[in-house]
Amino acid sequence: MRRLLVLVSLLACACGPATGGPHGDNDGGFGEPDAEGPVIPPREDANSSQMDATSIYDAPILPDGGECDDWVCTHPVDDGCRPNGGDQCGDGLDNNCNGRVDEGCACEPGAVQPCFVGPPGRHGRGACVDGMQTCVGNSEFGTWGECVGGIRPGAEACDGQDNDCNGCNDDHPSCCNRELTCPSTMPDGHPFQDYIIDGTMFFPGPAASWQWDVTGGPCDRLLGNTSFTLTGQTTPRLTFHPTLSGDYTVHVRIVGTDGQVYECTFIVHIVAPGLRIELCWDTTGRSDIDLHLHKPGATSGWFDDRSPAGQHDDCYYANCKAYATPPDRPNWGYPTSPLSECEGGPEGEYWRDRGACDNPRLDIDNISTPNIPENINVDRPANNATYRVMVHYYGGSVETHPLVNIYCGGHLLGTYGQAPDQLAGFNHGEGESSGLMWRVVDVTTHVTGADTTGCDLTALHPPGVPGGFYVTNDNTDY
């Protein structure tokens, strides 16, 4: 498994000089990263495998001869609120500062955009991090829903962060002797790899207790946080093992031996390359739902690998898992990916036998790995190629509400089937090549070099209808 070394960047206090670490110079004795994944937040010296924390942490100190009540922010930010105006559509900001983002702005249902609830002038400053909002409405045009996730401006907490996002860290008299230095940014992680956070790096003092919790994205909220695992939740060292892409909010509550409570909240981005499609549903274990991806430039029917033509234009559980072998596998002419992209998944041993990760591939099948969303990956998609996503109700008779997330270049760009716009009447399957089929979205990828730089999403509707879900029964047509 690839060992990813990650760094934490802590904002230096902008309100006065800063030197050394929170408790003086550090000799760098933080140990080596765990063999199973990254240790957060050390920094590796180019000439040593040991971790060196010198100058990573900057503690606030008072100006010479200053008192605590003199320690104020010298460059307050203009909030940029326009209380008598409307929101500027497309910027993901609450321009009129009424607590709602891009209200009244039209959008395509299912589209996702970054958003920030707070004064526009504080956007991107200090501890503030964008959330995400989904366009809701089951018609031709929708409206932007609630902005969820992210970190909004709050009161200064004496934690080494700029909590109110005004450009200055801990600009409050009570912060003169803070013991906590929360990370302001975190390095990206990767699906199927351990992400290890060492809390003693930002709270080195004696602690009576630790409590960590993590909040994930759309499928995690639907499934009740079952797609990732946490180890060490009540210890200083948390091991977070994600299976999905997305933004995860990490929170830790520390009680010092003196009874003082310390808390940190920050965002960890888990990213994967190329195009990643994820499927989850609310009746997992009582219904069998499958994810399909169609080859660009072809309009053959779904399940075509069972047809005499054997075109393999449809990637799904029968041919895209690790155990499928040529000529049964789809061959779309894409290069393989290194094992690090797939061997940490539930079929890792089979991918290791193959020696590489295929593109496309299905690395999680819910029927064999219950309660974990299915996903299909194309790490190296073609430029200006259009892929069609379909969801098939294979078996069962209970009504279910599938949710499909589209990640492109590591970013969530679309969420389809999310409440309140759930798919209704999706309630029966009759095995392969029959039952209900929901054609969800067409995804056109844009690639520069080896990087997927963006995707255009076109939600699919019944022919001749400007809105609604495109669902058929016993019809395998493209």
Image (tube, helix red, strand yellow):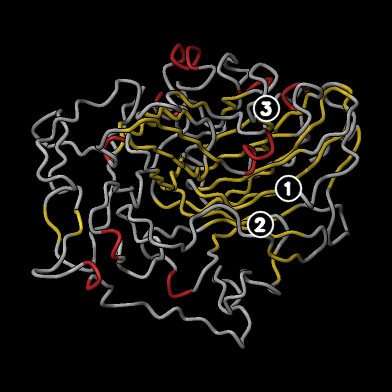
* Residue at position x 61%, y 69% in the image: 99
| Residue 474 coordinates in the image, percent (x, y) | 91, 32
Tell me the SS state at disc 3.
Answer: loop
Within 10 Å of disc 3 (Cα), the crowding (few <14, some 14-19, many 20+) is many
Look at the image and tell me in which quarter the C terminus lies. Answer: top right
Instruction: Specify whether 256 is left or right of 447.
Output: left
Tell me the SS state at disc 1.
Answer: loop
| Residue 30 coordinates in the image, percent (x, y) | 19, 30
* Residue at position x 39%, y 60% in the image: 163
Look at the image and tell me in which quarter the N terminus lies. Answer: top left
* Mark 2 and mark 1 residues within 8 Å of each other at the beta carbon: yes
Q: Circle 3 is placed at which residue position?
A: 316
Q: Nearer the viewer, residue 73 or 346?
A: 73
Q: Which mark is residue 134?
A: 2
Q: Amino acid at mark 2?
A: Thr
Within 10 Å of disc 2 (Cα), the crowding (few <14, some 14-19, many 20+) is many
Tell me the SS state at disc 2.
Answer: strand
Q: Nearer the viewer, residue 429 or 301?
A: 429
| Residue 281 coordinates in the image, percent (x, y) | 74, 34
Q: Nearer the viewer, residue 435 or 304?
A: 435
Q: Circle 1 is placed at which residue position?
A: 418
Quarter of the image where one finds residue 296? top right
* Residue at position x 32%, y 38% in the image: 258
Relative vertical location of residue 265 with respect to residue 377 in this rendering, above or below: below
Alpha carbon separation for disc pair 1 and 3 = 22 Å
N-term mark: 3 or 2: 2
N-term mark: 1 or 3: 3
Q: Amino acid at mark 3?
A: Tyr
Alpha carbon separation for disc pair 2 and 1 = 9 Å
